[in-house]
Image (tube, grey):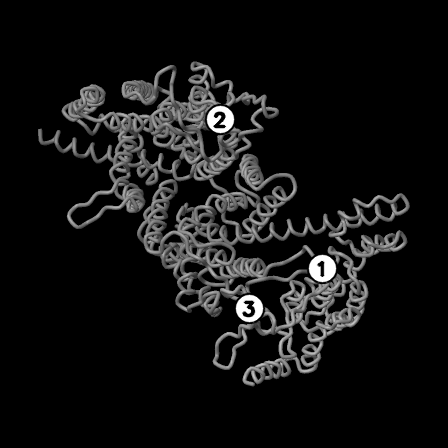
Amino acid sequence: MNMLNKLLACGLLALTTLAATAAPTEDLLKDLSAKDSAKRTETLRMLAESGDQRVVGILGEYRLGSLCLWNNQVVLALETSTNENLDKFIHLGDVFSREPLLDDSGKPLVLPVAELTLIDPSRKDRKAALNAIMLLELHAPDTEQRLEAVRKSGLGIKVEGLPETLALLEQSDRSRAVRKSAKESLALLNFRFGTPAEQLSAAGILGDIRSVRARSFLEDHEDPEAETVIKRALERIDSRERLILAFNIFNSGISSGSILVLMALGLAVTFGMMGVINMAHGEMMMIGAYTTYCMQLLFGHTPETPNSIYYVVALPMSFLISALFGGLIEWTVVRRLYKRPLESLLATYGVGLVLIQTIRLIFGDNRPSNSPVWLQGGVELVEGMGLSFNRIFIFVLCAACVLGVMALMRFTTLGLKMRAVIQNRDMAAAMGINTRMTDSFTFMLGSGLAGVAGYALTTIGGITPNMGQNYIVDSFLVVVTGGVGNLAGVVCSGMGLGLLNKILEGTLFGAVWAKIIVLITVITFIQFKPSGLFAPKGRLADD
Amino acid sequence: MTERTMNEPAGIHLGSICGTSASQINKAFAGALLAFAILLPMLAHAGVVSVETVNMAGRYMALGIVALGLDLIWGYTGILSLCQALFFALGGYAMGIHLAHQGTLHNGIPESLYVVYPYKVGESKGMEVLPWFWLIFKPFNLTILLGILIPGLVAGLIGFAGFISRVKGVYFSILTQALTVAAMMFFSKNEMKLCGTNGITNFTTLAGHELSDPNVKIGLYVVTLICLIGTYLICLLLTKSRFGRVLLAVRDSETALRFAGYKPYAFKAAIFIFAGMLAGLAGMLYTPQANIITPSYMEARWSILMVVWVAVGGRGTLFGAVAGAMVINLLYNAMTSQWSIGSFDWKPDYWPLVLGMLFILVVLALPDGLAGLWRKMVGRIAEVD
């Protein structure tokens, strides 16, 4: 009796969750053991139409022959065992939850085979169950799941009821993506399994919607009558593929360009404006990344317990900490080397070595970074064209930083002083500007910007002590190409180099070749325009 | 004016600062060092020092030759080149390929190449053909010639292109750095048939001599020592000549030199080519002693490290450059091994910290490097006398 109560409770639970469909599902399952073949087929059809996602798993078990009837209830055979007399016993489980059923004393329920009616599907039933599973997945309440199932259905076999279901989805589904996919899958099915006339119209549809997935089927199809239609469809698909390729190249180019600009922006301030070679710039970036990592630890953000607020706090923190380190370096090392730029290269490289090794001794080699929840994932514009949130974020951050630095230079007193010191140090000093302080602030600003770049990089890569080394040569090249001391030039050259790299990489060459070609291009470019894209003119031009 | 005195090199004032006795001290010291260097192989032969020590000294002397070249272009001419590592590696690869020809072969293909690129080495499987740039390094004499000429040629291309369009100072450094990075990627690619990131290794014989034989190791040391002394003397002659004085003029005021009717770019390119050749020679001497050459020798840190040898030794003095290379490498050797004093355990992990501090210290506190320090000391002693 206890057992029955439990089953009842289970049923009630199911009732409350799936109010309308639950009870019929239970009853329908019982009919799977019907003697009448037509009744079983009908049952499977009804199960398929019920839309009850729990049935997907049950039908899978049904196909394997793991269901049995006990006490007028359908139960799941979890496993079989034999005793010393070679009698077979079956361990029973609940069909919905897959939990073992318990007897009165609370032990798992194990019954001899003889007391149960095994439900053994025929070959035809198995096939029908497979169809039912496919159709059920097409009715999944979750849009993502449904979309996935709809997409998959076009490449699978044409099961009974599938075209009708797809047609229904195409007409009346809530989600636009599902409607489009249903249309594509339906056309694909028709093209692959239909009559010549159906194939012809399907080929037209596939061309109309520029279905990339249909390409291989269209190419393999040999039918002289449909040749022109197929050719036309393939041309349209080609154009779509080219568009997707161009979009993806552009997308990744812009994104790697934004990282370059973000990195080079700080360098444009320290190197471009002050003329200091800061080889530890990459390490300022690394410190920004580690600050972000520390914030992540402090706020206890892990994939299991997300606490994305940390990322908001980490932005000003990474700027501040990197700026502090920059100030320290300026105060101890760089200040003494303003007139010896080549030696500042060596000294700051030494600073970089010390920083890298210190961080390595403290934190170890590789630290995992977990993006905040709202930067994970992305949006898919069309199939194959996606924008990920972290790339968008980096682009926005980069734009904000560029505008911020420009505004700082143009509209604030500090910016005015900076420009004055850069243009004519002695005259600025004569006007009462504290050039030492201004130098310090400029250097701190540059270092802080590098910290922000490191902060942004944590969303796309791991945090390692020598992460800065990968970017330092590139960022120097960006600044040199853009023209020293010119923010607009840095933006242009950073984006330009990022795009050029990805275009070469995406079209003709591999990643390494693309990189080599970009490097050589820049080197050649500087041969002809030694002062960069936007060369300073007049008095600012060097001796 | 202030800027000039800051950049003033130490070397040229040597005569004026030091009296006769100071130069005697210098000579005595140099003589002692030379005697030690010559005695070292004999000591090894007698079993007093291990052959490994001699091998190590040989390697570091090869690096001293790179430092000589770098000192000529940086210390004397004021061009900070960050692609000496590239020239060094070019020489190293020339010798490496030559040595690989004499090592273990698989179907006629040297092992290092075969491992990385087993099939498409030739046109098809079964008729493997070595690429032409492997074949030209088969004869020993040609290898020696090419190992010096190729770095010189590359240096010529970079030098003429860069100096004619007046790329200077920091820009030249960054460009050469970028070029070295590009070259490293090029050498790291497997399909370039240059053995990829693994590099070339497992050498067995050089001109018919077993490389594992202690006598051959000592022999390589002697050859390196002779090369070092030879190149040192050539550099000395060069710096004392009119040519050397033009180099100093390039460093101190290129514009003034140009107005005086000289073409600075020709002098810069010439000395750059010479330094490149020296680096190539050094690479060729280094590779058989280190028994490996990989693209990692073209990493940024190597180029900068080479500059630091010169900075530590004292730029503008040839002796300082060699001494800097030796001292830093000996220091590296001591500090990347594990030892402990009392309860303090030294770990190899600390070495980058020391090196980094050394970079900063030398630039800030010792602009003339060890040579400057030595000069002060000797000057003091000479005064006392």
Residue A272 percent location from the top left of the image: 47, 48
Q: Which of the 4 image quadrants contains residue A41?
A: bottom right
Q: Position of residue A48 (x, y in %)?
A: 73, 70
Mark positioned earlier in the residue sequence (1 or 3)? 3
Residue type at the position of mark 1: Arg
The answer to whether tags 1 and 2 share a subunit is no
Q: Amino acid at mark 2?
A: Val
- Percent position (x, y) of residue B337? 26, 40
Q: What residue is at 38 percent from the left and 36 percent from the top? A: B302
Query: Which residue lies under the disc numbered 1?
Result: A151
Q: Please state, as top left, top right, bottom left or bottom right, where the N terminus of chain B lies in the image.
A: top left
Q: Chain of mark 3?
A: A
- Report if the CB atoms under discs 1 and 2 are less than 8 Å apart: no
- Residue depicted at 38% across the width and 55% down the height: A326
Vertical placement of residue A277 versus B17, above or below: below
Give the residue pinned by disc 3: A89
Q: Which mark is residue B154?
A: 2
- Tell which tag, 1 or 3, sits nearer the viewer: 3
Q: Is residue B121 above or below residue A67?
A: above
Where is the C terminus of chain B found, in terms of image quarters?
Answer: top left
Label 1: which secondary element: helix
A468 in relation to A24, above or below: above
Looking at this view, is B107 or A110 the one in front? A110
Chain at numbered mark 1: A
Q: Amino acid at mark 3?
A: Phe
Residue B262 appears in the rendering: no
Percent from the top left, x then y, of residue A73? 64, 78
Q: Residues within 10 Å of mark 2 (few under 14, many from 20)?
A: some
SS at badge 3: strand
How far apart marks 2 and 3 lie (CA) works out to: 82 Å
Q: Residue furthest left?
A: B385
